[in-house]
Image (cartoon, grey):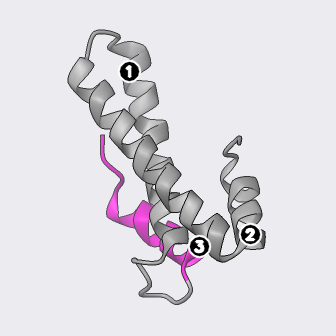
Amino acid sequence: MSVTKERKQELVGEFGRSATDTGSPEVQISILTTRIAEMTGHLQVHKKDFASRRGLLGMVSRRRRLLDYVKRKDPQLYLDLLRRLDIRK
């Protein structure tokens, strides 16, 4: 259900500012997007799992706040993230 270590390392390598960068908003948004995609698939199978639905909504809200922050600080990076992660806005 969770993102594997290998997948996280791929995301850090792809979106991070350095090889060990795990705290930048770009990396956090990419990891959250991966977790949201997995949780969405889980909820399509288990329609009555309301606890997971609540967790999904929390993750979506956290990603939205991070995206708003990136949009305020660097609008071009925001648009690039939306395009690379296939997030519609």
Numbered badge on residue 43:
1
Tell me where the magenta segment starts and ends, as one range.
Answer: 1-16
17 up-or-down from 89: above or below: below
Is residue 4 covered in magenta? yes
Is residue 6 covered in magenta? yes
**Of marks 3 and 2, which one's residue comes earlier in the chain?**
3
Numbered badge on residue 67:
none
Q: Amino acid at mark 2?
A: Pro
Q: CA distance from mark 1 to mark 2?
A: 32 Å
Label 2: state its secondary structure.
Answer: helix
Q: Amino acid at mark 3?
A: Phe
**Between residues 4 and 88, which one lies in front from this camera angle?**
88
49 up-or-down from 82: above or below: above
Q: Quadrant of the N terminus?
A: top left
Taking the image as shown, residue 29 lies to the left or right of residue 88, namely: left
Taking the image as shown, residue 16 lies to the left or right of residue 75, namely: left
Does residue 10 show up?
no
Q: Which residue is at a point 71% across and 42% down the rendered structure image?
A: 89
**Of marks 1 and 3, which one's residue comes earlier in the chain?**
3
Q: Where in the figure is residue 73, as x and y percent of width and height?
A: 63, 76
